Amino acid sequence: MRFALPLAAVVCAVIVAVWAWLGQPVPMPATPLAAGEKMPCVSYAPFRPGQSPFVEGLVIPPEQIDDDFARLAKITHCVRTYSTEMGLDVVPAMARKHGLKVLQGIWIGRNEEKNRVEIDAAVKAAQENPDVIDAIIVGNEVLLRGEQSPTGMAALIREVKSKVPVPVTYADVWEFWERNRDLAQYVDFVTVHILPFWEDVPVAADKSAAHIGEIREHVGKVFAGKDILIGETGWPSEGRMREGALPSPSNQAMVIQELLALAKDKGYRINVIEAFDQPWKRASEGTVGGHWGFLDAYTRDFKFGWGEAVSDHPYWLRQALIGVLLALGVFAAGAFGGRAGNMDTRRWLAVSGIGLFAGLTIGRAFVSVPVESLGAGGWIRGGSILALAVLVPLAAAFAVGRQARAAALTQALDGVSRRAAAPVERVMAILLAASVVVIAHVALGLVFDPRYKDFQFAGLTPVIMAFAFYALTAAPRVTAEASAAEKITAAIFLGSGLYIVFNETLANWQGLWTGVLLVVMALSLWRLATAAQTR
């Protein structure tokens, strides 16, 4: 026990120190807006938590749009909409009430009947409200989605343009404008989307403003003589990394402020995506899709202040305390398991490793799991990860202290083997089987369908590192056990980990962390399999 208290104190001190460092506010550039100055224009979707454009028959109450516009009128001159349905027909009246201008969107897809409803409604709105509607945007990224041909879009643009008294444009990512340059002859101005995060080669946050400027200059040369509107640009505050592009509150604040400063300096027309977070987008774009708003979906308030430092972990102290509590629990479990005097320096160091990795990441897991969980399946997986992130370190520390033998998957899956195992060995086998299922679900998702998948490294770290230290110290079993399950699973995890690192590149530290964890889990399983063959 003479090693326990000093090691526990060191582990707890490291946990607090790391979280204090992570919680430090990140300095921001000087505010791009003068006193009383507003943003030029922002994208607006009316859906609040629990609402979605995919809900059949949903009509947004006018009072909700009224409340949103009252808030937006304090910070912007203009809103860009994307549709006319689901209660958005009141937008012109509400905009007039609050002194806002509107870039009226028409949603164009494959369904010609719905397209006709959208076009007729927008034409009518523009004819009746030319004082409020500054322009009509016929379609949003339709060519990108492949839902209309360039010829078809040209025909729709010409039709709308012949019927309304305001300018008409079409909006798409800048590459698709470059591939379809002939469309420019049908629009009054070119509306391009420049989203550094979603580029084919993602651009890091600190280089995003320069990238936006380069692309804007390039588009200006391609469409010389045409006015250019950057119709969407911004940065997400939550979600998975793409190569070196990290969603975070501080990166979002920095990018938005730098691009606004760039627009003022260069005289660019610009629209920021987006006003309010849209949780419904998580279903199709993952966690990152629901967090492009600079206004929170629930509080409806700004996520940052102009020119003010931003902390990516404002609740770092409570996250540190959660970590300290789990680490102390790990030490207590190790001491309880080794109460018969089994604990030597090597085992206390193993318990310290379990406590350190669990304590460092469990606080982040408690915050990230609710953000990353969507639907019943997502919450089941997230809840399972959190439960294992607490239970596995405690059980592993106890097993290390007890000098438990190596557990095998067969002891969880086979009744005879399970009954023959010692209680602590049986518990470790069951936790191992449950962990393998959860880890495999995360790993294979990142291999076969990674674009919108979160890495969930925070919840996996306590689990995998606990098994690693347990595998290093576990005594061999005295009877031979079938080890094929561990070896096959180890091969799958090893291949997945290496592929994720390769696919995400070394610039993506979330991918690198997750890949290394999978390799560690593979090696731990291999060691357990080897122990299962020892007599």
Image (cartoon, rainbow, N blue to C red):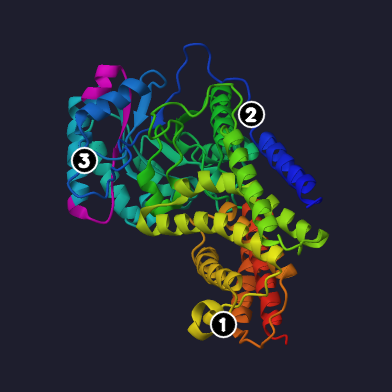
Total numbered circles: 3
**Residue nearest the viewer, comparing 428 with 113:** 428
Mark 3 residue element: loop
Instruction: Assess disc 3: are there few (<14), some (14-19) or many (≥20) residues with their C-alpha within 10 Å of its C-alpha.
Output: some
- Marks 3 and 2, how far apart in space? 40 Å
Instruction: Assess disc 2: are there few (<14), some (14-19) or many (≥20) residues with their C-alpha within 10 Å of its C-alpha.
Output: some
Relative to 161, 494 lies left or right: right
Q: Sequence-wise, which precedes: disc 1 or disc 2?
A: 2
Place of residue 533 in the rendered image (x, y in percent of width and height, measured from the top left) = 69, 86
Establish if 182 lies above or below 305: below
Mark 2 residue element: loop
**Residue nearest the viewer, comparing 129 with 446:** 446
Say what amino acid the circle numbered 3 marks. Met
Q: Sequence-wise, which precedes: disc 1 or disc 3?
A: 3
- Marks 1 and 2, how far apart in space? 54 Å
- Extreme residue in the top direction: 35
User: Which label number is shown at residue 420?
Assistant: 1
From the viewer's perspective, is the residue at label 3 or at label 2 nearer?
2
* Residue that badge 3 annotates: 86
Q: Sequence-wise, which precedes: disc 3 or disc 2?
A: 2
Is 238 covered by the magenta stretch? no
Relative to 17, 50 lies left or right: left
Circles 1 and 2, Cβ within 8 Å, touching? The answer is: no
**Residue nearest the viewer, comparing 434 with 418:** 418
